[in-house]
Image (cartoon, rainbow, N blue to C red):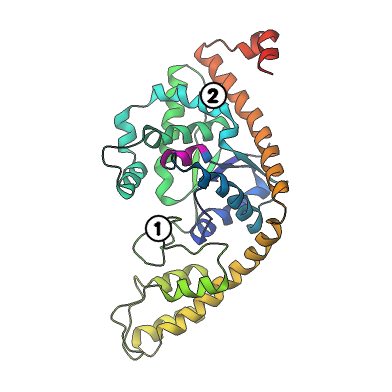
């Protein structure tokens, strides 16, 4: 039996280079050796987009395009829609009783996002509790591994806490420990260099960007404010262009020479940006072209998602049945044909 890996994204915008290096490249490898499930967390996205659900609806299609364009294969990876699996929400409701409000508020990921979104005292309850829903997503599929960014590892820790608490409370070995799989790049900075790359922060390079968009964004990147003239010595550390080159430039020897030349003076920022633009366009161009082809058949993309959701739901339903049995709850779907006939 192959081990199981579960990962996914919120459909709140197109995927960007941060997703590519932080998770998508991992998924391409994992689909070869794991049972890989990829969740499109549309219900979770509603926690801070409840008043504009149309944005989420359209981005479900966009995110599916990104998945297929980077090379994720529906024959090897199961794509599913969170809102299409009601069993996840029932399991979440049982987990709610195992987590305190204080524990949710201590979650570092939640604390940072609350600060960014500036909710004040008007925090949507769904937003504060979404780590519980994430735990249900992961535990329902009994995932062995969950690929995450460095900033998301506290979510895995909380999911493990919930799984352990359930096992202790109901004296069952139902849920096993989940291992986080951190991508080789913890955080890709935004083009502004001030924070991580984000969909809504105006600092992202998207996988669907045109060559012209890409060039303009790279030209906006921060370098060294003290490097005013070409002859001026420049700082490599903290220089966003060099941070990107460290990740994406495959010619390490040439890159080391460029760093030395920049430190001593004599290398223009424009030359570095031209190099980075060419490297990134080589990565994004084939993705963009495949994306264009897949976009011609929207129905096929939705069929892939529907088939994956049906498969995922059968697994989540089995886990929910096992959880209810451990809790001593009556599962009518297992005890009477009358009930089953009515719900159908």
Q: Residues within 10 Å of mark 2 (few under 14, many from 20)?
A: some
The span picked out in magenta is 43-48
Residue 229: image quadrant is: bottom left
Q: With 153 as the anchor, is 72 left or right in this view?
A: right
Q: Is residue 322 above or below residue 76?
A: above
Q: Position of residue 328 (x, y in %)?
A: 52, 11
Q: With 193 as the anchor, is 70 left or right in this view?
A: right
Residue 249 is inside the magenta segment: no
Report the mark closest to the observer, 2 or 1: 1
Residue receiving disc 2: 174
Q: With 131 as the anchor, is 55 left or right in this view?
A: right
Residue receiving disc 1: 201
Dot 2: element: loop
Q: Is residue 176 above or below residue 18?
A: above
Q: Position of residue 327 (x, y in %)?
A: 50, 14
Dot 1: element: loop
Residue at (53% x, 40% y) in the render: 42
């Amino acid at each position: 039996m192959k081990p199981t890996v579960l990962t996914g994204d919120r459909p709140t915008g197109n995927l960007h280079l941060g997703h590519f290096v932080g998770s998508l490249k991992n998924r391409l490898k994992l689909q070869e050796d794991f049972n890989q499930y990829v969740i499109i967390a549309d219900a979770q996205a509603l926690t801070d987009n409840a008043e504009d659900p149309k944005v989420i609806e359209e981005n479900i299609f966009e995110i599916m395009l990104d998945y297929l364009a980077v090379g994720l294969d529906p024959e090897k990876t199961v794509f599913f829609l969170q809102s299409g699996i009601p069993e996840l929400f029932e399991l979440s409701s049982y987990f709610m009783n195992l987590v305190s409000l204080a524990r949710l508020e201590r979650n570092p990921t939640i604390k940072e996002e609350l600060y960014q979104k500036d909710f004040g005292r008007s925090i949507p309850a769904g937003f504060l509790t979404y780590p519980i829903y994430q735990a249900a997503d992961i535990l329902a599929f009994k995932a062995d591994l969950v690929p995450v960014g460095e900033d998301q590892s506290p979510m895995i820790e909380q999911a493990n806490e919930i799984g352990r608490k359930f096992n202790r409370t109901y004296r069952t070995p139902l849920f096993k420990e989940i291992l986080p799989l951190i991508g080789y790049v913890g955080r890709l900075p935004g083009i502004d260099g001030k924070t991580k790359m984000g969909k809504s922060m105006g600092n992202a390079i998207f996988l669907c960007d045109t060559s012209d968009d890409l060039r303009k964004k790279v030209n906006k990147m921060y370098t060294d404010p003290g490097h005013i003239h070409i002859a001026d010595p420049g700082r490599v550390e903290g220089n966003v262009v060099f941070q990107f080159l460290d990740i994406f430039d495959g010619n390490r020897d040439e890159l080391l020479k460029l760093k030395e030349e920049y430190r001593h003076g004599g290398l223009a920022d424009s030359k570095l940006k031209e190099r980075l633009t060419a490297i990134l366009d080589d990565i994004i161009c084939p993705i963009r072209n495949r994306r264009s082809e897949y976009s011609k058949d929207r129905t096929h993309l939705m069929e892939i998602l529907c088939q994956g959701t049906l498969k995922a739901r059968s697994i989540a339903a089995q886990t929910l049945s096992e959880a209810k049995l451990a809790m001593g709850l009556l599962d009518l779907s297992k005890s009477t044909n009358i009930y089953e006939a009515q719900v159908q």
